[in-house]
Image (tube, rainbow, N blue to C red):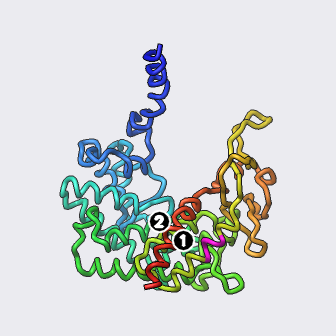
Amino acid sequence: MKTFCILSLILFFAPVLTTEAQKPLTDRSWASVANDMPEAWYGSEASLRIADNVLLYQRNAGGWPKNTAFHLPLSEAEKDKIRKEKEKEDAIFDNGATTTEINFLAKMYGKTANPAYRAAVEKGLRYILDAQYESGGWPMFYPLRKGYYTHITFNDNAHYRLLKLLKEVNDRKPLFAFITDPDLLARSQKAWEKGIEIILKTQIVVDGRPTVWCAQHDAKTFLPAKARSYELPSFSGAESAGLLTLLMGIKNPSPEIIRAVEGAVEWLETHKLKNTRWESFTNADGQKDRRIVNDPAAGDLWARFYDLETGQPFVCDRDGIQKSSLEEIGYERRNGYSWYTDAPEKVLKAYPAWKAKISRTTSK
């Protein structure tokens, strides 16, 4: 009987444990293929075919377009079309674009030593360096596009991903150890330093106390800025987590960095939505819907947006009018946007150890 029960449990849980691993490449997301395949897969025949696609899609400027399934097979007609689009100015940093492709090709170079992969990585890195504002921030697109795209873009962790990549280059991590050009390394180091400086310059200060950041900041004034109609200037409970992760990862931080981290952590602690769960349910019309539920057994969440005057969380429809609850906005925006996040939780858990380490360092 015990053997039967154990076997039943194995059979019951096996599909749950192996489903993701068993997915064919065509059923995976590009980010999953680029980042999460078994190490031995990179350099395989399948990965080589995908790397050819990634090389093909690289724009002449050096970056890549977003939301593109680079891992899917391409017909000859599709390849011809992509070759003709090399001059398109749609290279971008949003949604992990460009940094994901650079990381993938760096992995591929490490496995194959194919000089085409190395050249593409170095071209992509130069694209990142060329796109950086003198202030240290990055726009969403480069070459620049008019509109909110010129804002310094923390949105969807674009700035975080760019600086994370540069840090790995500067620290001579194994993935990027093949980058040895002195000029490229010097530029990368300077870009990292400027990228950290702009994080400090854009941090929202209230009553003399540093708080958190907006998802995007004006490239000239550094103030919180509006993006799409429902993305208003605000305190951000999402993007701020990535920026804090960068600051807390700096060895021997300056007093300014320490103050920035302490202020932001304090703000996140006082603005968390305790015992809150964001759940899916079937509404009265039989549609899959989402709602916020207060539950003593739930953890904490943070809103994506908090009002700059009141500090209260809000959501927004495409009309640009702030609302205090999901039920007040339409079905499309309610279900088509990440209004809440638990991203700060990891930062808050790491903070005590960071604080203790900083205290030991500063007391010497």
- The vertical placement of 332 against 265, above or below, is above
Q: Is residue 172 left or right of residue 204?
A: left
Q: How many residues crowd around disc 1 within 10 Å: few (fewer than 14), some, or many (20 or more)? A: many
Give the structural element (helix, strand or loop) at label 2.
loop
**Image quadrant in which the C terminus is located:** bottom left
Which comes sooner in the sequence, label 1 or label 2?
2
- Secondary structure, mark 1, is strand
What's the residue at 67%, 65% (across, down)? 231
Q: Kindly report the secondary structure that dominates the magenta region of the rendered protein.
A: helix
Front one among 235 and 43 = 235
Residue 191 visible: yes
What residue sits 79% from the left and 60% below the top?
323
Measured as percent of width and height from the top left, residue 335 is found at 68, 48
- Which residue bears the numbered disc 1? 153
What type is the residue that disc 1 sits on?
A: Thr
Where is residue 130? Give x, y as percent.
Answer: 39, 77
Taking the magenta stretch, the answer to whether it contains residue 266 is yes
Q: Which residue is mark 2?
A: 93
- What residue appears at the point 44 percent right and 60 percent down from the top-left corner? 97
Tell me if label 1 and label 2 are in contact, CB under 8 Å: yes
Q: Nearer the viewer, residue 178 or 253?
A: 253
Residue stretch in magenta: 263-267
What separation in Å lies between label 1 and label 2 (alpha carbons)?
9 Å
Task: Identify the residue shown where x is 50% and y is 59%.
Answer: 95
